[in-house]
Amino acid sequence: FDRFVEEKTPWLEQTLRRTHPNLGAGEFAKLLAKHRRSLRAEAKRAGDDEKLAAEELQSVIEKISGARLSIVRAEKFEVPEGPAILLGATLARRANLGRRLDKLADDGLICTVKGSSLILTGRRARGTLYAVYTFLESLGCRWVMAGSFGELYPSLKTISTTINRTENPSHTPRLWYSCEPASTDLPRWTLRN
């Protein structure tokens, strides 16, 4: 939902102009403002992808190892001392990964170890979520079907990594279409895959 919270939404203007070609300037401005408000509200309702990334990482690491990671939102966005898992572009830039981030496509991701920190980031928040899933897959996690019965996790007493992966999506829309009846587990499963 990163694009929904941007103030400028050219794709929205283009779509509304195509679907409402006969509106006057004033009516069009009201319609555009209404849709922008609606999109911002939807983005808030849906939640922050970086927060979801942190929650997914915490949950899955606990299932794998029994260890419950702390989630700390960095107030000043400073790289902490000592071992840490850093999520998101702001902390990645503070860890001097700005050049690598700038080369990513919108949903591109970086998973790397720098010093004693594991850095999982994307150019946008959605890329950070994909970085978490990529890291978890590198540990052996798989999501083969929607629902808990389709979640496959290794059992690890110690988790260590030397991951150093930079990826850009092979195509822009990362959507999963299915003929199966929708379940409450399907949206999360589609994110993971």
Image (spheres, rainbow, N blue to C red):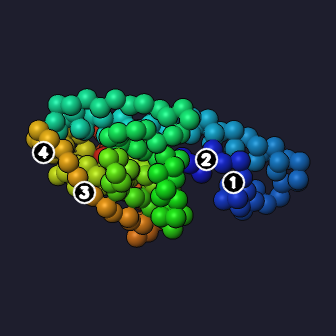
Measuring from the top left, give residue 43's x and y in whole percent.
Answer: 56, 39
Residue 158 visible to an observer of this rendering: yes
Q: Which residue is mark 3?
A: 162
Q: Which residue: 61% across, 47% down?
A: 4
**Gap in Å between the C-alphas at discs 1 and 4?**
42 Å
Give whichever of 117, 33 is nearer the camera.
117
Amino acid, disc 4: Pro
3 or 1: mark nearer the eye: 3
Which mark, residue 4? 2
Which of the marked residues, 4 or 3, is nearer the chain's N terminus? 4
Amino acid, disc 2: Phe
Q: Which residue: 26% across, 49% down?
A: 136
Q: Is residue 20 found left or right of 148 in the rendered image?
A: right
Q: Which residue is mark 1?
A: 9
Measuring from the top left, give residue 32's x and y in whole percent.
Answer: 75, 48
Measuring from the top left, give residue 68's x and y in whole percent.
Answer: 25, 29
Secondary structure beneath dot 3 equals loop
Q: Which residue is mark 4?
A: 154
- Is label 2 in contact with label 3 (beta carbons under 8 Å)? no
Which of the marked residues, 2 or 4, is nearer the chain's N terminus? 2
Secondary structure beneath dot 2 equals helix
Which of the marked residues, 2 or 3, is nearer the chain's N terminus? 2
Residue 106 visible to an observer of this rendering: no
Give whichever of 51, 192 is nearer the camera.
51
- Is label 4 in contact with label 3 (beta carbons under 8 Å)? no
- Is label 2 in contact with label 1 (beta carbons under 8 Å)? yes
